[in-house]
Image (cartoon, rainbow, N blue to C red):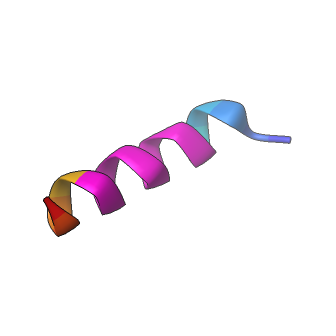
Amino acid sequence: MSWGRAQKSLLAGSARTA
């Protein structure tokens, strides 16, 4: 599992939605 990749995706999605 790519935790780093998942975290980056989550952060990007969160920042974009915020």
Q: Residue furthest front?
A: 18
In the visual, does 13 lie left or right of 10?
A: left
Residue 1 higher or lower than 13, as above or below: above
Give 11 or 2, whichever is nearer the viewer.
11
Residue in the image at 69% along x and 34% along y: 3
- Describe residue 4's horizontal placement relative to residue 12 as left or right: right
- Farthest bottom residue? 17
How far across and down, in percent of the image, does residue 13 sit? 33, 62
The C terminus sits in image quarter: bottom left
Q: Is residue 9 magenta?
A: yes
Q: Which residues are magenta?
A: 6-14
Say which of 14 and 9 sits in front.
14
Q: Is 4 located above or below residue 5 in the figure?
A: above
Give x and y (percent) for residue 2. Answer: 75, 40
Left or right? Give the position of 8 relative to 18: right
- Number of numbered labels in the structure image: 0
Q: Quadrant of the N terminus?
A: top right
**Residue 16 quadrant:** bottom left
Q: In the image, what residue occupies the spot 45% across and 51% down?
A: 10
Principal secondary structure, stretch drawn in magenta = helix
Q: In the figure, 2 relative to 18: above or below?
A: above
Residue 14 on image: x %, y %: 29, 55
What residue do we see at 46% from left, 54% from top? 9
Q: Is residue 4 above or below residue 2?
A: above
Q: Residue furthest top?
A: 4
- Expressed as whole percent of the image width and height from the top left, the position of residue 5 reads 58, 43
